[in-house]
Amino acid sequence: MSSKGLNQFLSTNIEDLKNKGLYNVINPLQGPNGATIQIAGRSLLNLSSNNYLGLATDSRLIEASVKAVQTFGAGAGAVRTINGTMELHIELEEKLAAFKHTEAVIVYQSGFNCNMAAISAVMDKKDAILSDELNHASIIDGCRLSGAKTIRFNHSDMDDLREKQRPRRSRVYITKLW
């Protein structure tokens, strides 16, 4: 496709998104992500943050973060599975495991990564997953990545869930060994 053709294709699709009300413009925060935020000079109540515990603006965590950056630098330099696992990660995981009274803990950099990795680690093509139709994209992607059969049920509908989890006669194979 020529650059002129590509530009036309992109322009048409952007206009289509705008016409459907699906075009997104990101308004950056002007300061920390807390219970109230500043966007375009306006103070707004924040109902869409993952910082629901207020940890991102907790003075103790900010101080600990500054010390960690001074000791370890501004980033891991690689993903954890290559050579990005630092003593800091191991210490956190050990403390979380002790707190949760469990054998071990692994920390992921996001919920998205966690769902993709955890689901595919414990499920495979021999398994079936019952999944709410409105699950987060990370859960859907984790199910797909696992290779398991995904059976979607209507959102929060326990009757539909029970119906979908029942074995189907057509899927039951009975064999006799003699």
Image: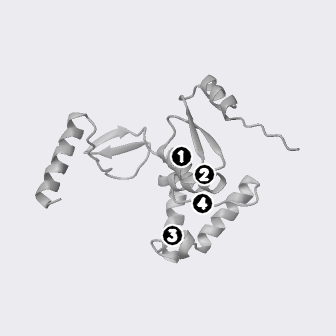
Marks 1 and 2 sit apart, C-alpha to C-alpha, by 8 Å
Image location of residue 175, percent across then percent down: 79, 40
Residue 2, horizontal then vertical, whole percent: 14, 60
Q: How is the image coloured?
A: one colour
Q: Where residue 27 sits in the image (x, y, percent)?
A: 28, 47
Residue marked by disc 2? 119
Q: Which secondary structure, mark 2?
A: helix
Indicate the quadrant containing the C terminus: top left, top right, bottom left or bottom right: top right
Question: Relative to 39, is 57 above or below?
Answer: below
Type of amino acid under label 4: Val
User: Could you tell whether 115 is left or right of 174 in the image?
Assistant: left
Label whose residue precedes the other's in the sequence (3 or 4)? 3
The amino acid type, in three-letter code, at marker 1 is Ile
Q: Is residue 166 visible in this depiction of the protein?
A: no
Distance CA(mark 3)–CA(mark 4): 12 Å
Rendered location of residue 172, percent (x, y): 71, 35
**First in sequence: mark 2 vs mark 4:** 4
Q: Which residue is mark 1?
A: 139
Q: Find out whether the residues at labels 1 and 2 contact each other: C-beta distance under 8 Å.
A: yes
Taking depth in this image into account, of 143 and 36 the one nearest to the observer is 143
What residue is rendered at 57% in x and 51% in y?
147
Residue 107, label in figure = 4
Q: Earlier in the sequence, mark 1 or mark 2?
A: 2
Q: CA distance from mark 2 to mark 4?
A: 15 Å
Q: Amino acid at mark 2?
A: Ile
Instruction: Report whether residue 69 is seen.
Output: yes
**Mark 1 or mark 3, which is nearer the start of the sequence?**
3
Q: Is residue 6 left or right of residue 168?
A: left
Image mark for residue 79:
3
Q: Of helix, strand and loop, which one carries label 1?
A: helix
